Image: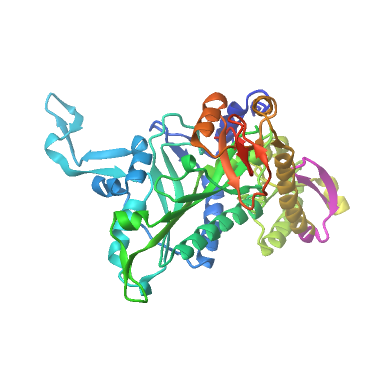
Amino acid sequence: MAKLTSRAEDYSKWYNELVVKADLAENSGVRGCMVIKPYGYAIWEKMRDQMDKRFKETGHENAYFPIFIPKSYFEAEEQNAEGFAKECAVVTHYRLKADPENPKKLIVDPEAKLEEELIVRPTSEAIIWSTYKNWIQSYRDLPILINQWANVVRWEMRTRLFLRTAEFLWQEGHTAHATRQEAIDETEQMLEVYADFAENFMAIPVIKGIKTASERFAGADETYCIEALMQDGKALQAGTSHFLGQNFAKAFDVKFTNKEGKSEYAWATSWGTSTRLMGALIMTHSDDLGLVLPPTLAPIQVVIVPIFKGEEQLKQIDEVAFKIQKQLRAKGISVKYDNNEQNKPGWKFAEYELKGVPVRIAIGARDLENKTVEVARRDTLTKETHPLEYIDIYVEELLQTIQKDIYNKALSYRESHITKVDSYDEFKKVLEEKGGFISAHWDGTPEEEEQIKNETKATIRCIPLNNPLEDGVSLISGKASKQRVIFAKSY
């Protein structure tokens, strides 16, 4: 099995190799698109199911809306249309036909031009709010709390598996409310749902904050976000929740009669996460041997590998292994017993390390004699001998410990890579030599924000929530500032 390129040597190459060699995904025949393979999709399914559970616990229902959006709908909210225009895939015709000059070749039928061009959804606010117009007449129809699991298309020029692809999977919530405060409460609630999911399920520490005006979602009055830090010192936006005000209600004339009998526009939110979280998972925890998966997300939480000579010894190990497997499954732990005789134990050890299986149990002849097993942790690469008695309880507790330890390791890295700076020279030095999040003062203008971005490629990732007030001066203009913001280079 070929080794991965080390992170220190080439982080980008390491990431790409790991995604492919760990059987998570591969490039497809369509430029910029990917095939998510069964092992990668199993991880995504765990993410999806856990988020879906949390959405339903907060009162949301799933629905599905068309992938095609009439161009006129898309144009209705000007900021949204302008923000996504460069990434849109557009359908202009609905039929192909044989080329008269070469019957084996298909060409677009010029007579099959659509009366109105269709946008392949880059996001669904337009099609959903055009639908909500028919659903909302009275305050009694509100709130509407809808989520959809879908694919979207954004025609990215520079792509990378999971992190940025022309088509990707996501969920997008779209809610309608009777008051401004209800919509703000919804926006903040969903940010908390995302942060809780990232930290307690994915073991990824995040900073909760608000985007600057120039970084907001197109068509939003405010964008809330969670920002994570990858091992190469770059930030990754892991989820966003948008307060849309009445912008889409006005664009699609969505009004309701309030309790006082007056007509007013509905208030809106939208929020989303995507398969980009797979990239965050890989880059936050994994190492030069392969994936490191938190137990909550591992398709296989425990693998049992027999070490034997001859059929008779394998039968004896089988008996013990199947008993352990049954005990662990009774506790809801996913277990694979790999007694495939085609591959040697060493190959299996490397394979399951590559795939990030949190716990490996090895059973050999000596273990049979001593009534013990060897238990190895993927995250620390440590191993120890443990008695067979109560092995199920030990492994159950070990998985919980691994989950906490993986989070704490990522948190320690994040905390050691938040650097306060007070000058532009110091800012540039830290950015190039250390990376990570940089906490610095900003004068609040888009001009200074844009200058820093152009000169350093660092952006303001967020204005942290509950940001402490602190007198200071901004990096470039020297204007007075009352709080620090978080800068970083990002994916």
Residue 477 seen anywhere in this rendered image of the structure: yes
Residue 87 placement, left or right of 227? left
Q: Residue furthest bottom?
A: 260
Residue at (83, 60) in percent of width and height? 389
Residue at (51, 59) in percent of width and height? 52
Residue at (58, 48) in percent of width and height? 209
User: 265 or 268, which lies in front?
Assistant: 265
Decide: is 167 above or below 456: below
Find residue 76 and report its horizontal and vertical position in percent: 28, 49
Residue at (54, 40) in percent of width and height? 444
* Residue 381, magenta (yes or no): yes
User: 416 or 35, which lies in front?
Assistant: 416
Decide: is 194 above or below 237: below
Residue 311 placement, left or right of 371? left
Residue 65 seen anywhere in this rendered image of the structure: no
Find residue 237 and report its horizontal and vertical position in percent: 55, 42
What segment is highlighted magenta in the picture? 373-393
The quadrant in which residue 286 appears is: top right
Quadrant location of the C terminus? top right
Find residue 108 and report its horizontal and vertical position in percent: 19, 33
Decide: is 310 above or below 451: below
User: 404 or 396, which lies in front?
Assistant: 404
Find residue 7 and report its horizontal and vertical position in percent: 66, 28
Q: How is the image coloured?
A: rainbow
* Residue 74, magenta (yes or no): no
